Amino acid sequence: MPGLRSGVADATTEIANRSGAASLFGTEIMGVTKMAQLNNLPSLDNSTWVNAGNDTIVDNRTATTVGALILSLVFILGFPGNVFVIWSILARARKQSITTLLILNLAIADGSLMALTPFFIIYLVWKKWIFKRLMCKIIFYLCLANMYASIHLIMLMSLYRVMAVLWPQRISAITGRKMVLRVLVVVWMLVIIASVPALLFRDVRDRSNTMVCEAFHDENSHTVLQYMLELVLGCFIPYSVILVSYVCILRRIRQTKFRRIRSEKLILAIVLTFCLLWLPYHIINVVQVSWAFCPDGRVKDILSKIWRSSRAVTSAIAFISSCVNPVLYFFAGKSYIRREGLAFMARLFEGTGLDSGTRKSRQNSQNSRDKDKDAEAVRLNGKDRDSVTNSSSNVKTSKNEK
């Protein structure tokens, strides 16, 4: 029995030693596995996928649903509305003034953006990108280009308005048709160049078993570069110019008995709606830039949650600005509907007070020039009559002397 007990004890000890070794070996394997998993995690320098919460901007079900609904309504109103504006100007407008040219280009930019809306609706509904990588780059590039074009065209409207108010006598020399066309070409070229980051950073990748089309940045500096460029070119510069322009206009209105005309109200409504609807998008850009600068910690995680959960909704709200303009044109030109029918919008653009004010100033200057010419002619005629009278009197005097 003592031998049996000794054998059992030795066997028990050997089993315990083996299990301990196995446990230690298993612990080491688990440790190595965890280290491997940690090494495979994205680097903190990857500014797109470091987050606390959602992995992609389409993971938030509420945000994507609201965004899809907004974009659907925007497309229903905006696409046919902008097409009608383009048709009205090209087919029904008898004369394309400077204001009309600016509104035509704005409608082209907004209409192009509306044509891209179905791709974003499908993206938000399916919560994954089902199109090709090339389509991802092209669609977001065109979207950014049309955003830049819209805000810079509205900035040109504000500049033209302030020149018409402050320098009505010189407006015709400063803003000739050829000059405006050249400016428009330059604006579109700058827009095309400024939108290149969308081609560089947009890509289709598999994240959380979902194909997403998003901006991927390998470093925080790339995030700052892209979104600071959007903030400077799409917000800070144009918003500052628009603000200064309307401050100058309001000061002139207070100083003089300047009558608020229809186009001034219309252009002011376009400016305000565009700025207000794009403001949330630019705020999220500020949040994302701040997140890129922020050190790792709780604040960085909170900023990540904010911009990821809000990007889809704020982008959809920004799209509303492209469908609002035709609605504003409709209410501004509803007095023409009964008289002009489908051509009411063309008559609205032809009769805008901004250009009529310019025409009035030109007419006034022309009338003053005509009056000066008439006065000069009368004066010359008087001199001619005096010279004729004097010559006849001299002839008579010479005859009498003879």
Image: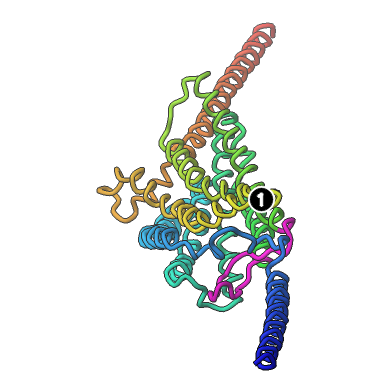
Residue 257 on image: x %, y %:
46, 20
Give the residue at x 62% y 47%. 299
* Vertical position of residue 213 compared to residue 375: above or below: below
The residue carrying mark 1 is 297
- As drawn, is 367 to the left or to the right of 184? left
Query: Is 221 placed above or below 3 here?
Result: above
Q: Is residue 304 left or right of residue 324?
A: right
Residue at figure coordinates x 68%, y 69% from the top left: 41
Rendering coords of residue 29 (x, y %) = 71, 79
Say which residue appears at 66% left-offset and 50% top-offset. 297
Q: Is residue 205 magenta?
A: yes
- Assess whether residue 315 is covered by the magenta stretch: no
User: SS of the residue at dot 1?
Assistant: loop
* Residue interval drawn in magenta: 201-222
Q: Classify residue 73 by image quadrant.
A: bottom left
Return the residue nearer the eye: 117 or 213: 213
